[in-house]
């Protein structure tokens, strides 16, 4: 990318404007920014999930709390697609 001359950069920008139009570019940039924010928040959530947690005796005794901790969500705030994690069942193979 360091080998591009200023004229080549202007030509690339002109082609992009011709392909997508000036009205679509702000919407595309906005959606790209929104996607980047979602990706960043999901990465933070994954890092937070990897941190070891200290379980208290109250949480260990409460089965409802254990069930709530084992729920997977597809997207932040999307409760329609969340489902409980199924435990792996041993299978017999011959």
Image: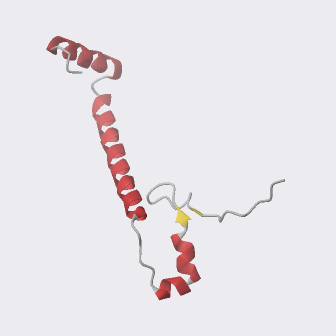
Drawn side of residue 40 relative to residue 53, left or right: left
66 and 8: which is toward the camera:
66
Drawn side of residue 14 relative to residue 72, left or right: left
Residue 39, image x, y percentages: 37, 48
Q: Quadrant of residue 14 in the image?
A: top left
Q: Is residue 63 above or below residue 32?
A: below
Q: Quadrant of residue 23 in the image?
A: top left
Which quadrant holds the N terminus?
top left
The residue that appears at 39% across and 66% down in the rendered structure is: 51
Farthest residue to the right: give it.
Answer: 94
Residue 88, image x, y percentages: 67, 63
Q: Quadrant of residue 64 in the image?
A: bottom right
8 and 29: which is toward the camera:
8
The residue that appears at 34% across and 18% down in the rendered structure is: 19
The residue that appears at 49% across and 83% down in the rendered structure is: 59
What scheme was used to colour the molecule? secondary structure
Q: How many marks?
A: 0
Q: Is residue 93 above or below residue 26?
A: below
Q: Is residue 68 above or below residue 49?
A: below
Residue 24, image x, y percentages: 32, 29
89 and 75: which is toward the camera:
89
Drawn side of residue 14 relative to residue 28, left or right: left
Farthest residue to the front: give it.
Answer: 94
């Amino acid at each position: 990318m360091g080998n591009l001359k200023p004229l080549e950069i202007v030509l690339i920008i002109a082609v992009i404007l011709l392909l997508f139009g000036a009205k679509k570019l702000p919407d595309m940039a906005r959606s790209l920014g929104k996607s980047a924010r979602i990706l960043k928040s999901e990465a933070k959530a994954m890092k937070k999930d990897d941190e070891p947690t200290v379980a208290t005796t109250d949480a260990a005794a409460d089965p409802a709390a254990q069930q709530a901790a084992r729920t997977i969500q597809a997207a932040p705030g999307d409760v329609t697609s969340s489902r409980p994690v199924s435990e792996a069942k041993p299978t017999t193979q011959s």
